[in-house]
Image (spheres, rainbow, N blue to C red):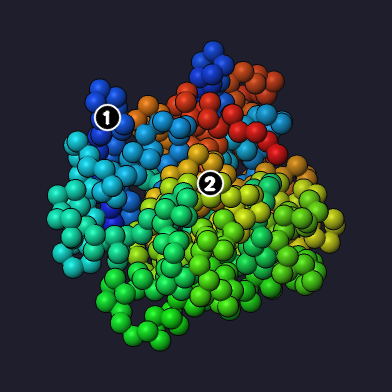
Amino acid sequence: MIELKDVSKTFTLHNQGSAVIEVINDVSFHVAPGECVALTGASGAGKSTLMRMIYGNYLTQSGSIRIGDVDIVKAEPRTVIAMRREVLGYVSQFLRVVPRVPTLDVVADPLRALGVSAEEARARAQELLTRLNIPERLWTLSPTTFSGGEQQRVNIARGFVHAYPAMLLDEPTASLDATNREVVLSLIEEAKAGGAAIIGIFHDEAARERVCDREIDVSVFTPGLSSCSGSIGYQKETAA
Amino acid sequence: MSTDLRPLLSVKDISKRYGSHIGCAGVSFDLYPGEVMGIVGESGSGKSTLLNCLVGHLTPDTGEVVFDTRVDGPKDTTTMSESERRMLGRTDWAFVHQHARDGLRMGVSAGGNVGERLMAVGERHYGDIRDKATDWLERVEIDAARVDDRPTTFSGGMQQRLQIARNLVTGPRLVFMDEPTGGLDVSVQARLLDLLRGLVRDMGLSAIIVTHDLAVVRLLADRLMVMKSGRVVEAGLTDQVLDDPQHAYSQLLVSSVLQV
């Protein structure tokens, strides 16, 4: 479902002496439907960068990133947009919303964009907000004023409201209490059971053990980070 | 995946000079149905010149602006007759000015401002026109009781919303906006952005938004074009251009935004 081939990325900082920073060098791996793969490596190894490249948020200089039959590296903006609407979900660490829009509509929004009726989209949004323990009295308010943990849960609800065949999760369990962490892990397990191909970043080791089938150490592909041995994409045996 | 095959607007090699000075040069892009494109750049970068060339307020020196008309299919609007282009401006196209005063008739009531555009496309039944005008005032969150008041009695934010109602009442397919939130205070801006976003989605509109406000394009636009000295220096997905800008000027633009 998600397939990376010889993917490399550099940042060129034109306004800082045209410094060229190599961040990712020659990554190849694939994720099958129903599989969850964890990106690991120390802070700064390029986990989030790689994830943003897969989402088309960062430009990839060379190689190909195929999601289904679309190569996101070469795709037109409108193809990427259609892809994000229908196929590729992304739960980032930060919630970015239009001010004033009620939480319920923020969560229902991805379904509305797919042409689902307002009632149906809201019903599904309510279901997820309830599961994630966002009290009903907050649903009509904009999430901009919510606490960090609440915003994170709204973000997760929004990310899981549509059953995307491919998903990217950036620290989905960070800043959550035990109860909500459990809810998020079961949402991930349900998405896997539904056939979603998932790539995740988890600092929470127990969570990683539970939902991920394999680990890929990103620092192996980071030029200048030589602390790691050459073992390419250390793989954990599938337990489940 | 669902993507339309034929662009709604196809712009090819638009250039406009003011004497020896370049207004804009060699601009080409395709806009597909339902897409919102932002054009950003500093003052004098040519973004307003480009917008005015696209809608026919200025005649470009070179290039084509091909619009997919309902009746005749794709047609170059730069070579259309004036009457044809005016008809387009009253039906499928809408233009939202930065200053609402430029897009409204200040001496006519709010309802009249909205109704006038309906009459221009042939509506004659007074009751229907008034009902539609009232409905649109409510959609842009103006109290229906103000239907007979003149826009001179409205606040800046209300005038801007009235201008939007006047423009959208005939169900256009393409909306051009020139700094639609410029000059409004931030709370009013947020309200207007929310409103515009909802209307764009519900009506399936395509839009071209010229602005210097990067936060506005991030929220409204699918795609972004960055202009400098009359030329497009970078174009792509909005979040990609803002988060991973490639050109030196785009990097400068993005890194110059003050954090709140």
Q: In the visual, does B21 lie left or right of B113?
A: left
- The image position of residue A150, as x and y in percent, is 78, 57
Q: Residues within 10 Å of mark 1 (few under 14, many from 20)?
A: few
Of B115 and A149, the residue lying toward us: B115
Q: Which residue is mark 2?
A: B182
- The image position of residue B257, as x and y in percent, is 60, 33
Location of the C terminus of chain A by quadrant is bottom right
Taking the view exactly as shown, the residue that stands out farthest to the front is B107
Q: Which residue is mark 1?
A: B18
Q: Is residue A74 above or below residue A240?
A: above
Of A147 and B92, the residue lying toward us: B92
Q: Amino acid at mark 1?
A: Tyr
Q: Is residue A227 above or below residue A209?
A: above
Q: Is residue B50 visible?
A: yes
- The image position of residue A196, as x and y in percent, is 56, 59
- Residue sitting at 58 percent across and 78 percent down? B145
